[in-house]
Image (tube, rainbow, N blue to C red):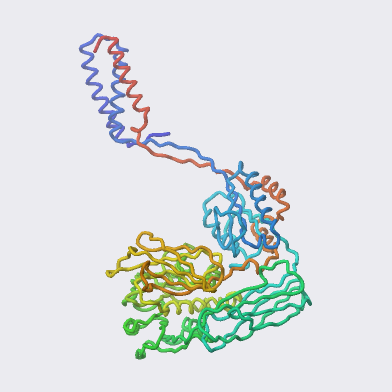
Amino acid sequence: MSVEASSFSVIVSFILSLVITGFFYFKFRKSSETASWIKLILTSCRFFIIFILVFLLFKPIIVTLKENVKKPNLLVLIDNSASIVLRDSTEGEKVRLACNRLRTEFSEMCEVHLIPFGTTLFEGQDLDFKNEGTNVNRAMSSLSDEYVNENIGSVILISDGIQNVGMASVNSLLKSPIYTVGVGDTGAILDAAVLSIYHNDISFKGGKFNVELNLSFLGLEGVLQKVIVEFNDQKVKEFFYRPLNEYDHLKKTFYLKADSAGLKSISCSVSSSLEDEILLNNSKQSYIKIVEDKQNVLFVSNGSSPDARIIKSSFFGDDKFQLESKFFKEEVPNLEHVDAVVLIGNSSQTNRWLKEINRIDVGFLWFTGVDGVFKNDFLQFVRLDESNDNVSVMVDESFDGFDLSGVLKSQDQLPPIAIPFGKWKINGEMETVFNEKIGGVETSYPLFLFSKYNGNTFGAFLGEGLWRWGFFQNNNDDDQSFIHELFTKSIRKIISKSVKSDLKLRFKDEWLNSEEIKLVVNRFNDVSELTNEKSLLFNLIDANGVSKRFDFLRVNNHYELNLGLLPFGVYNYSIRYNGHDSLGLEGGFIVKENKLESESIVADHYMLRKLSHETNGEFYLIKDLDSLIKKLKSSKNFKSVSFFESSLDYLIKNRWIFFIVLILASLEWFVRKWQGII
């Protein structure tokens, strides 16, 4: 503990105390025959009382140092995905017991953090092994960000090694060794699985559309398999297949005809005389939207460019779009019969096109590029200099306009996008799809967004370099369609038509059966103010025509409704004011079945061994947990860190100052009383 004060305050306090005490001393000396030692005591008491009081007027600070000892951290990452228990339900209990054992064994020597994960970290989540999707790479990245400045002794990863989201390889930015604990069975099983059903999201009434089935057969060589395909709950195809080896895959392509408009289901199931060990993946269902007409999309650009080629090519071969191309320098055609305009790049003629787009009230999607001036009714840009930055993309978690699972799967590996250096201003009600990630730092700066301004819905991608995504897509077989999916869904969003209403619904049209379905509705009055004075009703109709009614909650100045988890299927809805027959909004949505974890249930301990080897850790089976505990306790990884923490406070706040002054004043009074000087 120490006192901090300026030299000036000490000198002034000393001189004033000396002068005042001297005055009293000489006055007392002339009028008293008291002994010298008594005078010395009285003078000293008076000096120190005055010094303390004057010194306190300068607000001196007392500094207290406290030594803290911080234990090291043991981070235990626990795979909480469904694949852990799909093959053997007892594996989940083994993991729970292992976690409890680790907490008990290491609680005295370190801080034990049990962290479940699936597609990301879920700290505080119970171990229920129901998460769909496993992304070890993202979990490791999030862990390194969260504990970047912490004293980490070791990291333990408990998993079956099955990674079905993100990169196949796993990299760790942590400097600590990673010890992996393998769960599950790596042995072969008898299993026939429908891995995927590929088709366009939209097709057209009266036309045919392509369907591709992907099936896998493990341990079923020569066993006859029956495959049934249903379209809109009607059997349309049946065929038989004998697997050629123990690890056979079948890809089957065929065409289906769309006879009527609406949301239609496509399902596939496989069966044989031998009973599978896993029945959950024997069937799969998907949905397609059948519409009446093609949608006309007009592309406007400065000419051929890498970005223009990748954007246009993402629409080629998709029969739900009628495509046309123009240049900025050309005259603006009649846009009355155009459903959407895609602007690629920028030009001195861009504003001429935007004025006509605004007048006709047609939705547009603008890939701005990095060149030129941006100053129009929809967005403005203040350029700080002529340089460009390279940024990574980060999906905004609040965006719910449509499903982004394809991009989420690849976002950590996507090449950077070039953006101009400056500040954007976006007019209207903005929804952010991607934010910028600069140098690994997540920001709230929008990179891709939608907005509605002056009755016109538009999207803006604020940069260039999408051609790099095209190269990435071509080199990654698992990501062949995410660019097409992103752009076509963006077009559908800006051209979607709705009933004229004062209600604005924030709601996506595709959900998973593992997601809670939540709606937010805004109502604007005549002066564009948010209000929720009227009560709203939500009417939900499932595929069987069964109707359920829900009441919206009025929260602050908007409406909210949580439908919870719904079974997979097609649903329609309508929103009306309570007590009124007039329609507010209507529409439909799809709930998809999430079976990602059942696609592969054979444990992959090779990935776990590789990760431990690269980080100077070791691999253990869960049955060998005692060996891991013994290894960690004998290691020198766990070292406590000592540090000093200083606290500042005014000296006058300390009680002992008061007692010192009180004791000095009491001593002076007692001596004077004793000597009869008072």
Decide which of 263, 313 is in the foreground and name it: 263
- Note whether 628 is above or below 200 in the view shown: above
Residue appearing at x 40%, y 73% in the figure: 585
Q: Quadrant of residue 126?
A: bottom right
- Note whether 190 is above or below 334 in the view shown: above
Q: Quadrant of residue 556?
A: bottom left
Q: Position of residue 75 (x, y in %)?
A: 59, 52
Q: Position of residue 224 (x, y in %)?
A: 76, 78
Residue appearing at x 24%, y 18% in the figure: 25
Decide which of 375, 190 is in the foreground and name it: 190
Q: From this viewpoint, is residue 438 visible? A: no
Decide which of 516, 351 is in the foreground and name it: 516
Q: Quadrant of residue 582?
A: bottom left
* Side of 596 relative to 361 (left or right): right
Total marks in image: 0
* Side of 400 relative to 359 (left or right): right
Decide which of 471, 42 is in the foreground and name it: 471
* Side of 653 relative to 209 (left or right): left
Q: From this viewpoint, is residue 65 visible? A: yes
Q: Position of residue 383 (x, y in %)?
A: 35, 72
Q: Quadrant of the N terminus?
A: top left
Q: Position of residue 34 (x, y in %)?
A: 27, 9
Q: Quadrant of the C terminus?
A: top left
